[in-house]
Image (spheres, rainbow, N blue to C red):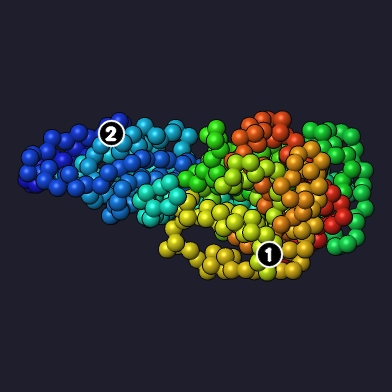
Amino acid sequence: MDPKRRLVLEHGLKSMGSLGVLVLLLTESELVGANTSAKLIGVRIWPSEEYTRIALESDQVLPISHQLLTGPDRLVVDIEGLQLNPTLKDLVAKVKPNDPYVSQIRVGQFQPTVVRLVFDLKEAVKPQLFSLDPVAEYQYRLVFDLYPTNPTDPLMQLVKESAKKEKLLLEAQGKKDDDPIAAFAKSGNLPELKSEKGIKPSVPQASAGKANDLSGAQQRIPFKRLVTIALDPGHGGEDPGAIGARGSYEKNIVLSIAKRLKSKIDQEASMRPFLTREGDYFVPLHRRVSKARQVEADLFISIHADAFIQPHARGASVFALSQQGATSSTARWMANKENSSDLIGGINIKVKDKQVAHLLLDMSTTAQINDSLRVGNSVLRNIGDFAPLHKNKVEQAGFAVLKAPDIPSILIETAFISNPQEEKRLNDEGYQERIAEAILAGIKDYFSKNPPVARRG
């Protein structure tokens, strides 16, 4: 390219307006090779408080280079072998005002076969840029994950959210009215919250006024500390999960059910819920497990909507981990399908740390599996009171998301989204409410017989 034209081009990129699209007139010689450029199939943005993901799907691998700039904060990405086209321009309009990290995206033809993306950032980020090979319905994907430089501590956030409930629980037990957040910050643990396994704690009576502060929470406090329930809505973001014949996405249905269950747990005086994802974004399997461990969860429940190759398959199922292979061919098939979530959702293999590799090994213990089977049977019984079951017992297989070695963990398939009748039921708010109620009833039944032990140090 002529040096003068290049200077004009670089100046134009620096001065692109809010619309962020620079249209170039290239000479005939500069268009040589344009016909061999990659074809861009789609662009998607998945914003969340945890991180923002930008995905570009194409028919071939896209080589890239990038740099972070400050004053103001920007991420500049050059993509080789690509021509500016309407699909790429659509990326500009996909940025939402509530995106925590991206204020706008500007695109331009930096060189005849190089497109430049400029991400104007709301704060400094730690970007991860990587490529994904074709899988499932996707072709090649170029992924930009923008993480905050100072991520929120999920345990501290949970303590803040449940501070009022914690205070009321302590007061109901006649304990000193400590500030649970201050106590947590000081000691790294919640204050004086212990119980012994196998011994049901005393049940002090809370005053009616304090119980009303919990918006209908139980007036009798069954435990000496708050029980933390980690709720894991399966899939999300780039990973839609199963898709029903009517076009329903599993990721949306299970998030709705998880939020309903969270709301019900919020009404329990002695329990607090934690969601591994709160919106439509992807969370890798190992990250779901590590989040549950970070908040010191007493129970981990992964919520899904089943799918099978035959549309007449029906009924809810509950699964636990197995150390000795799957209990049935269906359980093995289901585990393999759910474990493929990382490939579809897209993880950056280069940044997998030792903890990730360790968690993906079979770290399960006999005690964890036995507890998982107990709570699984309790949940299955309660679901079976109103809904058909696929199997009348808890099945087991090597689900990666159930491998927390110290947290009872179950995976619930709420119904078959691949069955047209059950897909319709899964979209019904009444059915979602009843599923959430049944899961909560199962949780309460389990803990009434297996009170939580003291928190880990």
What distance separates the C-alpha of mark 2 from that of mark 1?
A: 49 Å
| Residue in front for this viewpoint, 388 or 343 | 388
Picture disc at residue 163: none
| Image quadrant where one finds the C terminus | bottom right
Would residue 48 appear left or right of 327 to someone viewing this image?
left
Under mark 2, the amino acid is Pro
Q: Position of residue 373 (x, y in %)?
A: 77, 58
Residue at screen point 21% across, 47% down: 37
Mark 1 secondary-structure assignment: loop
Q: Are marks 2 and 1 in contact (CB under 8 Å)?
A: no
| Residue in front for this viewpoint, 44 or 165 | 44
Q: Position of residue 415 (x, y in %)?
A: 67, 42
Under mark 1, the amino acid is Ser
Q: Nearer the viewer, mark 2 or mark 1?
A: 1
Residue at screen point 7% across, 40% down: 28
Q: Position of residue 441 (x, y in %)?
A: 81, 44
Would residue 246 appear left or right of 304 to someone viewing this image?
left
Q: Report crowding for label 2: few under 14, some 14 to 19, many 20 or more residues within 10 A (C-alpha).
A: few
Q: Is residue 178 above or below residue 15?
A: below
Residue at screen point 36% across, 40% down: 42
Q: Position of residue 102 (x, y in %)?
A: 41, 40
Would residue 113 appear left or right of 327 to someone viewing this image?
left
Residue at screen point 59% across, 65% down: 359
Q: Which residue is mark 1?
A: 322
| Residue in front for this viewpoint, 130 or 76 | 130
Q: Which residue is mark 2?
A: 86
Q: Is residue 401 visible?
A: no
